[in-house]
Image (cartoon, helix red, strand yellow):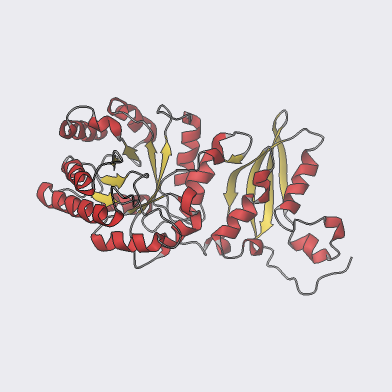
């Protein structure tokens, strides 16, 4: 083989852990194929340069059986292959092999040199709690609903929720810039209503408008939200992209907490034999992209996530990772007031409990008081 004199990589590597559905006879070949597919994507026998084989192609660090027909594969990739871009890092970890059956990304580790390129959450778990007055209980969140109400009607609702003690009031993720509820007046009126409620009721409530938007409008909506007095931003990274959310988080002219919403992401983790593990998708990727809290459908709600999957998700949001701040898990999706004690026992203090429709069954003010009391207990 000819050697490549131009290639002199650092030797530093990041690692990705996959679960691989394969027979014992094909596991090693599939593992090697993943190493090639995610880097050179070229027949290795046609590569004459030894340096490319030695330095660029992924390296199998471990291949362990987990159960009949199921293996754990650890692959080390050169940090240079990720460049300095979140888009390419995700592509390197799970680009082409996301199209293959039976491969699931379950964990990743970044060495310090690569991790230093990611600012991650600006506030994180502790900073976001501090923004809300750092109560002893979990933070409480709700959404402005239903779609179809006017900006003035939603602002009045936001005022009542803030006076009721809700810490974070977000737009429903379906509220954008519809003709019946334009973005600018909704954000201005809701931010003013929450500020008035904080003055009159002595709270620390923050309003987080949904700035998910077409690429050319995303930053402008975020800037408009900040200028209007919003206390944070709601972003759907499954719709705008993780790096678009990262750009907002890194923007020092914004400097607002970000809640990541899971819209359009469910299919990425629905198949246990493929896609992304819950802790990777909602935890590690959101932290790399700068979210300060991660909304997800909790077990026991109207979606199908299990308690085990939710535990793994919380671990991805909170475990030491790349020197990035831990973020707050936000269990949601049909949560009810009569389950607050159960949720508190499961998620603990370092969480944001999100209840939407159930707050409106009966007297809203009384239900808010019940929510606060149950979380405090």
Q: Position of residue 183 (x, y in %)?
A: 30, 54
Q: Is residue 319 visible?
A: no
Name the residue at the bottom extreme: 6
Nearest to the observer: residue 338 or residue 226: 226
Question: Which quarter of the picture shows residue 269?
Answer: top right
Nearest to the observer: residue 257 or residue 170: 170
Across the whole image, how many numbered discs are drawn on residues? 0
In the rendered view of the protein, which quadrant contains the C terminus?
Answer: top left
Identity of the residue drawn at 30% across and 62% down: 224
User: Going by the image, does 89 lie left or right of 266?
Assistant: right
Q: Is residue 222 visible?
A: yes
Q: Position of residue 82 (x, y in %)?
A: 62, 61
User: Going by the image, does 184 lie left or right of 39?
Assistant: left
Identity of the residue drawn at 86% across and 64% down: 48
Name the residue at the right extreme: 1
Q: Position of residue 226 (x, y in %)?
A: 29, 61
In the rendered view of the protein, which quadrant contains the N terminus?
Answer: bottom right
When the figure is inspected, residue 343 is found, relative to residue 30, above or below; the finding is above
When the figure is inspected, residue 52 is found, relative to residue 63, above or below; the finding is below
Q: Position of residue 38 (x, y in %)?
A: 70, 53
Name the residue at the front extreme: 179
């Amino acid at each position: 083989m000819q050697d490549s004199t131009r290639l002199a990589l650092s030797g530093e590597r990041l690692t990705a852990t996959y679960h691989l559905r394969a027979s014992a006879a094909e596991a090693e070949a599939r593992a090697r194929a993943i190493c090639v597919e995610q880097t050179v994507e070229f027949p290795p026998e046609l590569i004459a340069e030894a340096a490319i084989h030695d330095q660029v192609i992924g390296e199998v660090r471990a291949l362990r059986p987990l159960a009949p027909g199921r293996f754990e594969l650890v692959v080390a990739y050169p940090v240079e292959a990720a460049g300095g871009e979140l888009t390419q890092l995700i592509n390197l970890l799970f680009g082409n092999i996301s199209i293959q059956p039976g491969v699931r990304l379950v964990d990743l580790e970044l060495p310090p040199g690569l991790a230093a390129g990611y600012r991650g959450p600006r506030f994180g778990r502790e900073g976001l709690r501090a923004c809300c007055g750092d109560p002893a209980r979990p933070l409480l969140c709700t959404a402005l609903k239903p779609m179809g109400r006017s900006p003035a009607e939603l602002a009045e609702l936001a005022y009542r929720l803030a006076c009721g003690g809700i810490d974070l009031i977000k737009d429903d993720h379906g509220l954008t810039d519809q003709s019946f509820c334009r973005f600018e007046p909704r954000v201005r009126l809701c931010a003013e209503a929450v500020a008035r409620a904080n003055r009159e009721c002595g709270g620390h409530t923050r309003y987080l408008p949904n700035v998910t938007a077409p690429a050319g409008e995303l930053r402008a909506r975020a800037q408009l939200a900040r200028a209007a007095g919003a206390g944070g931003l709601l972003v759907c990274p499954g719709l705008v992209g993780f790096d678009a959310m990262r750009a907002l988080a890194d923007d020092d002219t914004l400097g607002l907490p970000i809640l990541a919403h899971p819209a359009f992401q469910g299919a990425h983790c629905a198949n246990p034999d493929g896609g992304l593990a819950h802790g990777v998708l909602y935890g590690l990727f959101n932290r790399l992209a700068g979210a300060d809290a991660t909304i997800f459908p909790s077990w026991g709600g109207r979606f199908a996530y299990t308690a085990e999957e939710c535990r793994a998700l919380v671990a991805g949001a909170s475990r030491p990772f790349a020197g990035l701040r831990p973020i707050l898990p936000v269990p949601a999706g049909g949560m009810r007031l009569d389950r607050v004690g159960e949720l508190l026992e499961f998620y603990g203090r370092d969480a944001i409990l999100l209840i939407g429709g159930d707050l409106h069954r009966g007297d809203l003010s009384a239900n808010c008081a019940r929510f606060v009391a149950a979380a405090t207990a």
